[in-house]
């Protein structure tokens, strides 16, 4: 009987971790992710370098609005440091946010609309993962939504510098 209890315990443990989250756990995880994203934006607004980069996953990525802006955490850290050292952060205020979770609750992804004084309405989207029991930003992608009515004009403007 003792030999049977160890395999049974292992199987039960594996199944428990593979089980989907219940509705209450999913809601709590979504709330936790929202708190992390709010802290992420607050740290950027306050030019708080350590807090901001403490929210990124070890192998996180930041993708900016320009096609050339694709940074690993270390690359982004180097880019941001002079701005934050000078007390110049950036303020994006969330106005709407959707958060989703993988069935096992180990990964979350989101999209959010943000208001920025200079750019107006922007969109952030990304992925969070758990590292050492905490939600961390594995990818953040900032974009500027383009209304369909003017997309052809915008595309033409983007293409012009490349053609010159």
Image (cartoon, rainbow, N blue to C red):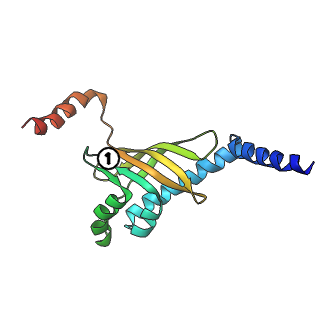
Residue at x 63%, y 39% (from the top left corner) = 103
Image quadrant in which the C terminus is located: top left
Report helix, strand or loop for mark 1. Answer: strand
The residue that mark 1 highlights is: 120
Residue that extends furthest to the left in the rendered view of this protein: 164
Front residue of 126/46: it is 126
Q: Is residue 39 left or right of residue 26?
A: left
Q: Is residue 43 above or below residue 85?
A: above
- Looking at the picture, how far across and down is residue 128, in whole percent? 51, 49
Residue at x 33%, y 53% (from the top left corner) = 71
Residue at x 43%, y 49% (from the top left corner) = 139
Q: Is residue 53 left or right of residue 99?
A: left
- Looking at the picture, how far across and down is residue 55, in whole percent? 48, 60
Front residue of 75/120: it is 75
Q: Is residue 147 left or right of residue 12?
A: left
Residue that extends furthest to the right in the rendered view of this protein: 1
- Looking at the picture, how far across and down is residue 93, in whole percent? 42, 53
Q: Is residue 42 above or below residue 13?
A: below
Where, by quadrant of the figure, is residue 145 drawn?
top left
Q: Is residue 59 left or right of residue 4?
A: left
- Looking at the picture, how far across and down is residue 69, in whole percent? 28, 49
Residue that extends furthest to the front in the rendered view of this protein: 3
Residue at x 62%, y 45% (from the top left corner) = 105
């Amino acid at each position: 009987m003792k030999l049977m209890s160890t395999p049974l315990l292992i199987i039960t443990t594996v199944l428990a971790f593979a089980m989907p989250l219940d509705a209450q756990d999913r809601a709590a995880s979504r709330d936790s992710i929202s708190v992390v994203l709010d802290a992420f934006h607050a740290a950027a607004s306050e030019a708080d370098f350590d807090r901001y980069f403490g929210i990124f996953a070890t192998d996180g990525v930041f993708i900016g609005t320009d096609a050339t802006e694709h940074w690993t955490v270390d690359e982004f850290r180097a880019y941001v440091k002079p701005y934050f050292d000078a007390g110049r952060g950036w303020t994006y205020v969330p106005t709407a946010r959707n958060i989703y979770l993988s069935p096992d609750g180990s990964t979350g992804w989101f999209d959010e609309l943000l208001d920025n004084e200079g750019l107006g309405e922007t969109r952030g989207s990304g992925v969070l993962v758990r590292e050492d029991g905490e939600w961390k930003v594995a990818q953040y992608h900032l974009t500027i939504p383009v209304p369909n009515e003017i997309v052809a004009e915008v595309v033409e403007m983007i293409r012009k510098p490349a053609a010159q």
